[in-house]
Image: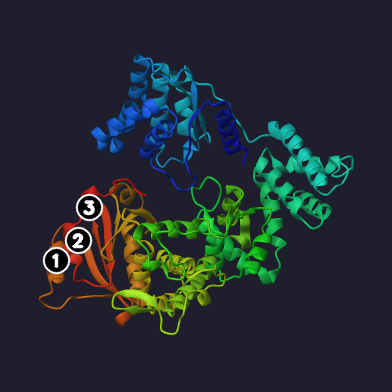
Amino acid sequence: GVGKSAIAQTCAEELKKLGRLGAAFFFAVNVREDAEQFFPTIAYQLSTKFLDYRYILDQRIRHDRTILKKSMAIQFETLIAEPFQELEKTRRGIGRRMVILVDGLDECKRPDDQSRIIDIIATAARDSATPFRWAFFSRPEPHIEASFTSDDVTQVTCMVLLPVSDDANPDIELYLRSGFKNILRRRNIPVTSQWPSDDNIQTLVNASKGLFVYAATVLRDVDQAGSPSEALRAACVATLNPTDSSVFAGLDAFYMLIMQRIPPEDLSTVLLLCRILCSSASYPGSGYTSSVMHFSNLLELSEIDFRATCNRLSAVLHVHDHSNSFDPPPRFGDTDCPFWHAAPSFIEELRVYVSVRLGGSIHFYHKSFYDFLIDPTRSGPFCVWSSPMHNAYFKHCLGVMLKYEESYDFQGSDLILAHGVADSAPSLSRPYTNELVNSMLKACVYDWAFDICFQWGDLPEIEHQLLQRFGRADFRKARQNQVMVFAGNDGFLGYVRWDCGAHSKVIRGTQLFRVPRDEFQKNFDVTEFKAVIKRWKEGGIIQPYHPNIGSRFKSFVAKKSQDTLISRLYRMGHGPKSIFWYWEINLKEEYYQDFMTADLADVERIYQEEWFDSWPTKPW
């Protein structure tokens, strides 16, 4: 909230104008990115600016593709330091100091990796190994501060602290006064007006407690209000008697005011929207953006109703309009056909567009509102990470899933629109203009709803009757829909499974999952997993499955069970609506993996042929 990411962004923009920006890496908040992506990404950005360097980099990677999986120190030397040293020796250096910006280092997944990055770059700076200056923007976590203040590193660094303190008050006052002048200008009111008063400004400055995000949120709220004067008065009153003395007291009081102003009849829908946004980490720096039309249809709201819901949160929620048009490549042709008739490469392009851009994107203005919403001590009755909201979210997504499954049917093993359903538009609360996009939009929403029910159905707070309803769903349709949606993605997909980062891969309609060792060691709870299995069996979601005598898969499971692992095979769902779910936990090698499939016939071959040792070793 002190503005470090805004400063990083401004620095990047100004350096780019000056031609001095080498690269910029923004660690995504809440994604917890792996450090092994850091130096390769920097190298790629540099290669787009320096052609001679690009040639050397390309040759090195072609010669040894395992570089991208090696230690960070080797990556730095091989991908960055040595190529630029080679250019210097042949008088093809870049000629001047360039700057590389790194924002959110504290969001890198492992603290040891954060410190290692600092050490590698500090060593290079001491040895003048590269022609770059590096700038880090980060919260002062103890291990990061310790790295920067070590004797070896302080020789080559300059550190500027942005403390959350009253020292920022003069700057916040200037920011507020400038913002209010802009509000007056937009309304054609002379800036000589005595509004707001000096007392108003001082009240807001005091309430900010050094957080620029507070001032920015108040200005947005006042600017978008029908009565700016009343909005300003309410903001000042809300901050006069904060409930606690924490640095977030003023900010939380204002966030509470925003939520308290929502009419009771709209509150449940607004909270559901907030929960969806929090579940998808929709805020700047998270690495995620979400499509407006995707969320409109997930909430089952028309365009007008969705916009009205968003307007209740206009001070904290940004809806960015993109062009609604989607022009398919000429190779596809007919937009009146559903997406599953398209080439796989186009399906992936369409899926990304529909999920991320269709109708615009939506996210919170700042992560602080996300933090407020998920912390019951701060948001109280408006907390979206509570037992009532877990059930409300699950119930809503289950309703969407059950509604959508009725409009599909099978033709052999293919999922098609049910008899009598002409197109996808009637299922959508906010359809697009053609069947190509509508069919993908509907499939993406259906997949999201199923994934939420599966992912959040492991919570002990979910009511038993909701689990029973989920158990009666058509898992076969949901599974096949997921296969179709991701038909264009032939690589690994990232999933959260059992509170762990997992990797997924679809092979001939069978979906494989694996939680790698690092994530298994840190986050996989075997006891809780067994408790989930018990709840799902009691809820009728799964039933143990024992293949008929002579079944190849029966012997396969028996063989696996004799090893050092725990494994089980279940039917998920009932009768023709069910799929098979097999899981195994290897306590010796420390991993979890499973598969979901509608047909066991080909699974043994897939499972035995798949080389799991080649899967990513780092958690998603």
Mark 2 and mark 3: span between their CA atoms? 9 Å
Q: Residue at x 16, y 69 (%)?
A: 553
Q: Is residue 31 visible?
A: yes
Q: Are marks 2 and 3 in contact (CB under 8 Å)?
A: no
- Place of residue 596 in the rendered image (x, y in percent of width and height, measured from the top left): 29, 67
- Place of residue 489 in the rendered image (x, y in percent of width and height, measured from the top left): 35, 56
Circle 2 SS class: helix
The amino acid type, in three-letter code, at marker 2 is Tyr
Q: Is residue 385 visible?
A: no
Camera-side residue: 324 or 385? Answer: 324
Camera-side residue: 6 or 593? Answer: 6
- Place of residue 467 in the rendered image (x, y in percent of width and height, measured from the top left): 42, 75
Q: Which badge, 1 or 2, is on the more N-terminal residue?
A: 1
**Which disc is residue 203 wearing?**
none
Count neighbours of disc 2 (C-alpha within 10 A) and say few if under 14, some if 14 to 19, many if 20 or more: some
Which residue is the site of mark 2? 607
The amino acid type, in three-letter code, at marker 3 is Phe
Q: Nearer the viewer, mark 1 or mark 2?
A: 2
**Which disc is residue 556 wearing?**
1
**Which disc is residue 612 wearing?**
3
Mark 1 and mark 3: span between their CA atoms? 17 Å
Q: Which badge, 1 or 3, is on the more N-terminal residue?
A: 1
The amino acid type, in three-letter code, at marker 1 is Phe
